[in-house]
Amino acid sequence: MNKKLSLSLFSTCMLLTIQQTKSVEYCCNRDYAYAKTHFSQRPQGNNQALVFIGTVDKTHLINNEENYLNFNVTLGYRQNFNNYDLGKYFFTERGPLNVGVANTDIDVQNLQLGLAQNFKGTACLLPEIHEFFADIDIFVGLDKWFQGFWGRLRLPFVHTEWNPFLNTSNNEVGTSVYPSGFASYPNSIINVEYRSLEDALYDGCRIGEIPAAEAGRINCNKKRYGLSDVHFEIGYDFFRRDHGNIGIALIGAIQTGQPTVHNCNQFLFSPSIGAQRSNQLGAALRCQYEIFNNSTENKKITFYSDLRTSYLFPGCNQRLLSLWANGTTAFNYWLMLNRYNSQGTYLGMERAANLLNKKVKVSAVMFEWTLMGQMQKNNWDISIGYNLWTRSQECLCMVDNALGNGADYYAIKYTNTDPTTNPPSTTASWGTYFLNKNTSDISTQSQNSEDRLTPTVDHLNNYAFLAGDIDVCVAQHPSTYSNMFFGSVVYNFSQTWLKPYLALAGQLEFGRGNTALSMWGVYVKGGISF
């Protein structure tokens, strides 16, 4: 393959991914994010540092004219640290979530979670992630048939466990019944379902006429396992010399893993495998150069580099979005709503989370650069390296923007709402019974500012949520990156048939703020070459 053609193919892939990055409208693009409903971690199979460890000197062989194969398996364990900052991603900038009486210094009004109207409490997340995995890697060099051509297939199997470690405190339990009209028709007595904030965030069961929550709950310890993706590479080392080579590759991954959701999306913090059901396609530019070689002492030093970029094609997910109320007011997916038709007839009660748990298509761009130095002496080698991983902000598109059936109106419940006589009827007091969606949020209640208004189109637009009043930013993972440092010690049984080798390695990864995971990991790798 012509060198100019190889480089032009790589450049084309780079331009396509850069264009995708520019096309994204950035909101919440910063080191730290808060009040989010979805976390997209780095796909487990996109970790080139693991591919380098123990194997990189046994592939892309210099001065080779025979076909060859390398087969290896990596077993590893990873765990996150910096748990407190990760908890802020789902709650508040200061960390804890304050729940209490409306119009006070709180984040969420107690009634919206099914608690008593004078309940007070706080909640905090300290999430832990534990991952076990086995990565099967097969590399084939085709120098005998097509000098410089090669292929690779990788199968990363993952068992991941996510535990939010919810910590709560109840400062004041509150009354034993809900206000008249809040969870049922007026004058009906409905006992308070939850006496603790922990139960309210975990459960989300039916309360009177209010249906059970289908999304937005905090989960207990959850596990997921499976094949992350099927990764493949087809490459050509177009520049080959005595002490090094340079190559280009077409890379990709076929999605097989599961995101946090499949047919449902019940929890805010739930385990994920793979790249959010997105297939990947991109290009890689790799090189290696031997800077020192003492054949007498059987010692040499080599540097390796790999730069790759991938486009993540739109993958279908189901995520919890938010209402477009007062901009992007935090936590409004926990609101309780009354439902009406266009004539003002009361149709029942609903939770905002049940309306906002919607199918979306998600795409992004990823870059990864790995640099490693390796010193070899006799049968031993020691390596240290650095890995930079980045991902653009997700481009998230709703499959539809309807609320419920797309024709009904939804109004935020006030503490003493009588659903049978409330707007949009002509005699109702709009300001008494409903929050204005343009000026109020989940921590406030009615200001009683507009009394006995006629139900015009303007009133409906001000007080009721319609199709299209949905914001995706809350479920959209911002652009992020991580810096990883890794090292390994390898022993090569070079005089033995199949030339087996065994490697021990460790990694330390520092994510950007709380938008990428900070993790440590330990690994053992074994393989053969023939």
Image (spheres, grey):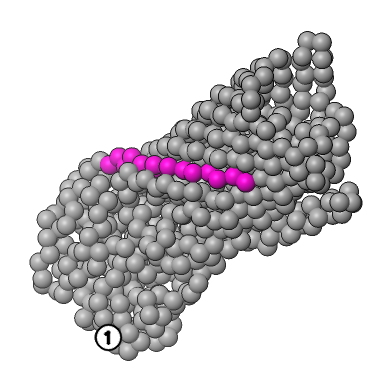
Whether residue 141 appears in magenta in the rendering, the answer is no
Left or right, residue 19 beside residue 328: right
Left or right, residue 84 beside residue 432: right
Quarter where residue 261 is shown: bottom left
Q: Nearer the viewer, residue 276 or 233?
A: 233
Above or below residue 200? Residue 519 is above
Name the secondary structure under disc 1: loop
Q: Nearer the viewer, residue 332 or 72?
A: 72
- Residue 26, horizontal then vertical, whole percent: 61, 57
Left or right, residue 268 beside residue 191: right
- Residue 466, horizontal then vertical, whole percent: 42, 77
Above or below residue 187? Residue 444 is above
- Residue 104, horizontal then vertical, whole percent: 32, 52
Quarter where residue 292 is shown: top right
Q: Is residue 31 visible?
A: no
Per the image, the residue denoted by label 1 is 345
Q: Is residue 246 visible?
A: yes
Tell me the crowding category of disc 1: few under 14, some 14 to 19, or many 20 or more residues within 10 angstroms, Cα based.
some
Q: Amino acid at mark 1?
A: Thr
- Residue 387, horizontal then vertical, whole percent: 65, 35
Above or below residue 379? Residue 95 is below
Q: Residue at x 58, y 24 (%)?
A: 502
Left or right, residue 165 beside residue 39: left
What span is colored magenta in the figure?
A: 153-168
Q: Nearer the viewer, residue 212 or 324?
A: 212
Quarter where residue 280 is shown: bottom right
Whether residue 158 appears in magenta in the rendering, the answer is yes
Q: Residue at x 43, y 42 (%)?
A: 159
Above or below residue 469? Residue 472 is above
Q: Nearer the viewer, residue 129 or 211?
A: 129
Q: Residue at x 56, y 29 (%)?
A: 526
